[in-house]
Image (spheres, rainbow, N blue to C red):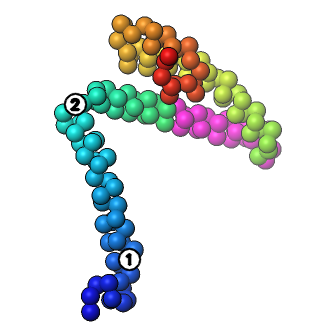
Amino acid sequence: MTDLQASGASRLIYVLIAYPALALLPLLLAPLSLGFACLRYRLWDIDFIINRTLIYGALTAALALVYWGSVIVLQWLFRQVTGQAQSDIVTAVTTLAIAAAFQPVRRRIQVLMVEACFVAGTTQTKHWLLSAPPYAMTCKPT
């Protein structure tokens, strides 16, 4: 009896694990090879891109965590002071208060990151990044 005609657990393992892995392997070889070549031979300044991506990603995650924690703590304090249960109004007010407080912090951190990431010769890019709204940070300057 061959593997394809087998029944039971061995057939289940082949169909659920081995076959999809073997089918995806050729599809993954091209991107993995390209990534390996870029890292090994320092093509396209990929180290610069990876470094900036990690910096901005870590900063965004840290700010999101602090923002979320601040909202939770402010809601807890409001409930302790007023003695009320959680309400939609309390959630909206605390979220708006934290968002208003975080705007200057976000702006200052954005300025520090742009100054740290870009050299003095790229003033047009720095100006564009500092004047752009937060959602435009992923776009290229024209």
Q: Is residue 25 above or below residue 39?
A: below
Please say whether residue 117 is one of the residues in the magenta stretch. Answer: no
Q: Answer left or right for 106 relative to 13.
A: right
The spot of residue 140 in percent (x, y) is: 48, 22
The spot of residue 80 in percent (x, y) is: 73, 41
Which is more N-terminal, label 1 or label 2? 1
Other-residue count near label 2 (Cα within 10 Å), few / some / many at <14 / 14–19 / ≥20: few
Residue beneath the point at 37% across and 67% down: 20
Q: Is residue 85 above or below residue 131?
A: below
Quarter occupied by the N terminus: bottom left
Q: Answer left or right for 53 relative to 89.
A: left
Cβ atoms at labels 2 and 1 below 8 Å apart: no
Other-residue count near label 1 (Cα within 10 Å), few / some / many at <14 / 14–19 / ≥20: few
Q: Answer left or right for 62 relative to 24.
A: right
Please say whether residue 64 is one of the residues in the magenta stretch. Answer: yes
Q: Looking at the picture, which amino acid does disc 1 mark? A: Val
Can residue 83 be seen here? The reply is no
Cα–Cα span, label 2 and label 1: 40 Å
Q: Looking at the picture, which amino acid does disc 2 mark? A: Arg
Can residue 134 be seen here? The reply is yes
Residue beneath the point at 36% across and 7% down: 120
Q: Which residues are magenta?
A: 63-85
Say which quarter of the image contains residue 125.
top left
Secondary element type, mark 1: helix
Which disc is residue 42 wearing?
Answer: 2
Principal secondary structure, stretch drawn in magenta: helix
Front-most of residues 4 and 87: 4
Q: Name the residue that disc number 1 marks.
A: 15
